[in-house]
Amino acid sequence: MNTNKFATQPQVPVDVIIPVFNERQEAIGATLDACLNQTYPVSHIYVIDDGSPVPAAIPQRIEAIGKVSLTRLPRNQRNAAARNAGIEKSAAPLIACVNCEVLPAVDWLATCVNYLSERTDVGVCFTRTIPHHPNRLLSRWRMRFQETRFGDVTGPSHFAPGHAVLFRREAVEKVDCYNTSLGNVSEDSDICERIRAAGWDTHFIAQSHCVSIQNDTVTEFAKKELSRNDWESPKDYPLSRLILQRSKWTLVRMGRNLLKARLLFLPVDVAVWMMTVKIAISRTLAARGHRRSDLDTTQPPG
């Protein structure tokens, strides 16, 4: 099981899986450029459009290279299912799952491949992700409260955040890929836990990094808060329960920021909470409107 099947091979094929949903076109292009410009060349990149209302597209200049293909899923199934769709298409012994808006440094893939070639007990590896503008207030807030933080030492980690991760195919196949029932919530930690149970560790590598070009806005933060709460609409659970949960954790966060004199974060805390509630109410009203419309169309005339 924990055999190093590729250590002696000069160039092990690596495929990249990039799930996209409602992504900026320039972000798709930038992510693809970063993956194609690695010092360790990728074999193929599978872009999986997870049912975006406006279909994703590959820039023509990149499409002409012949290393990138686009698959569109019929409906939005969330990250776990989109990644699985890409993994199913790949036959490479190493698989990199990279999120859109995440730009791996040019040595990222070489660093990760070399690490796995030297450590037969490791099935998953990743590096830190840093924001494109680390000194901006909103970027600092995101990195503290919405991203996992790691130290400066290479070694074992409980899980690999899904921004950019390199897997051994045999480890992924051993655990039947991502758990699609989890969608966008804890799917990263879940697959790493199952891979660990199957005999491979997950390791953080301090020697390289990725750059996040995410638009750091209050709206994006609010959408992520909803996703972390596994709430897309009132079909998931009642709006009142969501607001209660978000209010509780916002107060906890603000209390910690007060105690640690992080006063500049307090307006962001409030703004994110307000935007989260606003988006949730808007989605709830839209869902009610759709239900009323469906009832009107099903009632007999007259």
Image (tube, grey):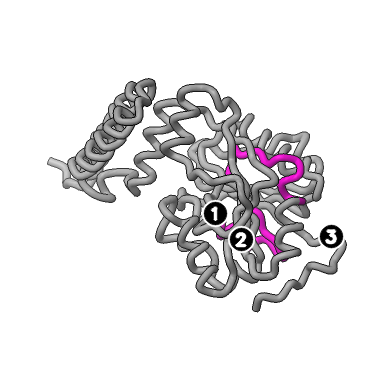
Badge 2 density bin: few <14, some 14–19, many ≥20, Cα 10 Å: many
Q: Which mark is residue 11?
A: 3
Badge 1 density bin: few <14, some 14–19, many ≥20, Cα 10 Å: many
Q: Which mark is residue 186?
A: none
Disc 3, SS: loop
240 with respect to 6 (left or right): left
Q: Identify the residue at horizontal 22%, vertical 39% (top origin).
A: 248
Q: Nearer the viewer, residue 110 or 174?
A: 110
Q: Quarter holding the C terminus?
A: top left
Q: Which residues are magenta?
A: 83-110
> Is 190 covered by the magenta stretch?
no
> Which mark is nearer the camera, 3 or 2?
2
Q: Nearer the viewer, residue 34 or 89?
A: 34
Q: Amino acid at mark 2?
A: Val
Marks 3 & 2, CB-CB < 8 Å contact: no
> Is 92 covered by the magenta stretch?
yes
Q: Nearer the viewer, residue 302 or 165?
A: 165
Q: Identify the residue at horizontal 63%, vertical 65% (top origin).
A: 123
Q: Amino acid at mark 3?
A: Gln
Disc with the residue nearer the chain's start (3 vs 1): 3
- The residue that disc 2 covers is 124
Q: Identify the residue at horizontal 52%, vertical 47% (top origin).
A: 50
Marks 2 & 1, CB-CB < 8 Å contact: yes
Q: Quarter holding the N terminus?
A: bottom right
Q: CA distance from mark 2 to mark 1?
A: 7 Å
Disc 1, SS: loop
Q: Work out whether residue 286 can be spotted.
A: no
- The residue that disc 1 covers is 160
Q: Identify the residue at horizontal 16%, vertical 47% (top origin).
A: 300
> Which mark is nearer the camera, 3 or 1?
1
